[in-house]
Image (cartoon, helix red, strand yellow):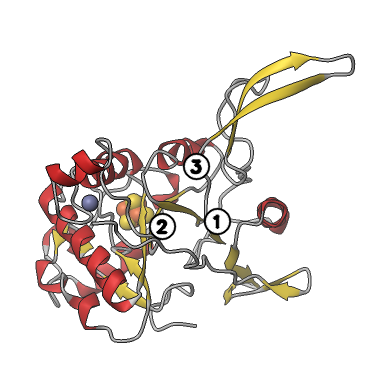
Amino acid sequence: MSNTGIDYATKSWNIVHGCDPVSEGCQRCWAKGMAARLRGRAGYPVENNGFAVTIRPDRLLEPLGWKEPERVAVGFMGDLFHPKVPREFIFRVLDIAVQAHLERGHMFLFLAKRVRRMRHLVTAYVEGGHVCGAGPFCREQHGGKGCPLPEGLLFGCSVENQFFTWRILELLRVPGRLWVSIEPMLSPVYLRKIGGDRFGWGRVDALAGLRYVRANAMEHGCEWETESVRRLSHVALGCESGPGARYMDEDWVRKVRDDCVETGVPFYYKQRRENGRVVHLPELDGRVWDQLPDLAGVPACAG
Ligand code: SF4
Ligand SMILES: [Zn+2]
């Protein structure tokens, strides 16, 4: 258990707080309640009951001061990719995350619901040669693509039900390592069956990294042709918490866990409710599921 309240992170880097709801998962936003308590204090604004979008340049350098390698939750008190957060600020956050990862070995977990903006800005950052800072020269050296982000930066989206798995389709186009947080889980989520038509054409398996592109009729049934797409490196999952929290069925959890085990993707079961209380890191089928993404094979920026 960390000191962040987010079990899989050891530090919170609250460089932005405040947000506006975008979907069902926002209904009992945990960050909103927290902002209301801090309203008018500690840098939290009075507007919007403390939840007006606020950037915190004063906190930018924090990760460079943490001496031990940490797993850092980035901007979980809001959405870093909210349209009110300027692009220049987001680029600065990425600069510091890259530097702090290379110097200190921290892992950064970015999490957003505005995945489209995340995709646009992270792509612009990488393709602009900002990872190594060489700009147009870097682009030139890497066929217009720029140095890749180090694997210590993970970009994720929240998904509360199958409908919002379209966010994962956007996420798979973010040029970095990827993860998904299914929290609060409000109904079943099938990470191996995203999008596509009702026959399965175009469907994406985000855990195996496959898209089903064509079905060839065989004597018995049909055989799918697939193409590779990017895949998730981590899945975290938890129920809603707080008064009036909505129901989560453990069979939904089991399905996600089974899919992750089958494909070798680290799975983290963060919390469930038992007799009205939230239990952190509960056991599921005889064990705790606290698998985390590894940092094996982190490529250094080629410069
Ligand atoms: S996107 Fe996240 S931070 Fe923003 S309102 Fe929804 S749950 Fe809260
Ligand atoms: Zn470069």
Q: Name the residue beneath numbered marker 2.
A: 28
Q: Position of residue 295 (x, y in %)?
A: 47, 68
Residue at the image point whose x is 52% and y is 36% from the top: 229
Contact (Cβ within 8 Å) of mark 1 with mark 2: yes
Q: Separation of disc 3 and disc 1 at Cα?
A: 32 Å
Q: Quadrant of ligand 1?
A: bottom left
- The residue furthest front is 141
Q: Secondary structure at mark 3?
A: loop
Quick check: 164 left or right of 73? right
Q: Is mark 1 within 8 Å of ligand 1?
A: no
Amino acid carrying mark 2 in the image: Arg
Residue at the image point whose x is 10% and y is 66% from the top: 57
Amino acid carrying mark 3 in the image: Arg
Q: Position of residue 118 (x, y in %)?
A: 30, 45
Q: Secondary structure at mark 1?
A: loop
Residue 230's label in the rendered image is 3
Closer-to-camera residue (35/84): 84
Residue 246's label in the rendered image is 1
Amino acid carrying mark 1 in the image: Arg
Quick check: 243 left or right of 251? left
Q: Secondary structure at mark 2?
A: loop
- The residue furthest right is 220
Which numbered disc, 1 or 2, marks the residue that appears first in the sequence? 2
Which numbered disc, 3 or 1, marks the residue that appears first in the sequence? 3
Number of labelled discs?
3
